[in-house]
Image (cartoon, helix red, strand yellow):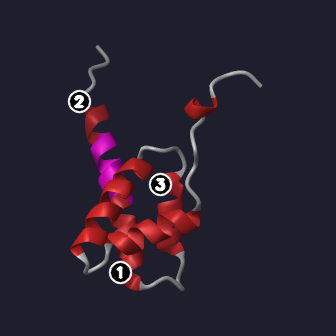
């Protein structure tokens, strides 16, 4: 296999995304800030929205974690949806 190994995209695990969402829901401002920054980075990676949706669908996860997960999905989808609507096909 050729190519630079530093250019290979690393996909997040569901455990990592869950931990980051849990941190983003924290009452500790430092933890919340660090987790929000990490979440922003993770969302740019392929597969993270699927993982967030899986977390939101887990009935065993705490409600606030499930809600925050699906809100993140909604925010990303609505942002991308709006940016595509403004593209002219004429």
Residue at x-position 49% and y-position 70%: 18
Sequence-earlier tag: 3 or 1: 3
**Helix, strand or loop at disc 3?**
helix
In the image, taking residue 88 as reference, residue 38 lies left or right, namely right
Residue at x-position 54% and y-position 86%: 60
The reply to whether the magenta stretch includes residue 79 is yes
Camera-side residue: 88 or 76? 76
Q: Residue furthest right?
A: 1
Percent x, y of residue 34:
31, 62
Q: Look at the image and tell me in which quarter the C terminus lies.
A: top left
Residue annotated with mark 1: 64
Q: CA distance from mark 2 to mark 1?
A: 33 Å
**Circle 1 residues within 10 Å: few <14, some 14–19, many ≥20:** few
Q: CA distance from mark 3 to mark 1?
A: 17 Å
Q: Residue furthest top?
A: 90
Residue at x-position 32% and y-position 42%: 81
Camera-side residue: 74 or 46? 46
**Helix, strand or loop at disc 2?**
loop
**Circle 2 residues within 10 Å: few <14, some 14–19, many ≥20:** few
Residue annotated with mark 3: 49
Residue 86 disc label: 2
Percent x, y of residue 47:
54, 50
């Amino acid at each position: 296999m050729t190519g630079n190994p530093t250019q290979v995209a690393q996909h997040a695990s569901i455990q990592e995304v869950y931990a980051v969402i849990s941190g983003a829901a924290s009452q500790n401002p430092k933890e919340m800030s660090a987790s929000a920054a990490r979440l922003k980075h993770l969302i740019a990676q392929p597969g993270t929205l699927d993982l967030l949706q899986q977390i939101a669908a887990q009935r065993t996860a705490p409600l606030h974690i499930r809600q925050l997960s699906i809100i993140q999905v909604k925010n990303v989808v609505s942002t991308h949806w709006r940016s595509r609507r403004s593209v002219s096909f004429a």
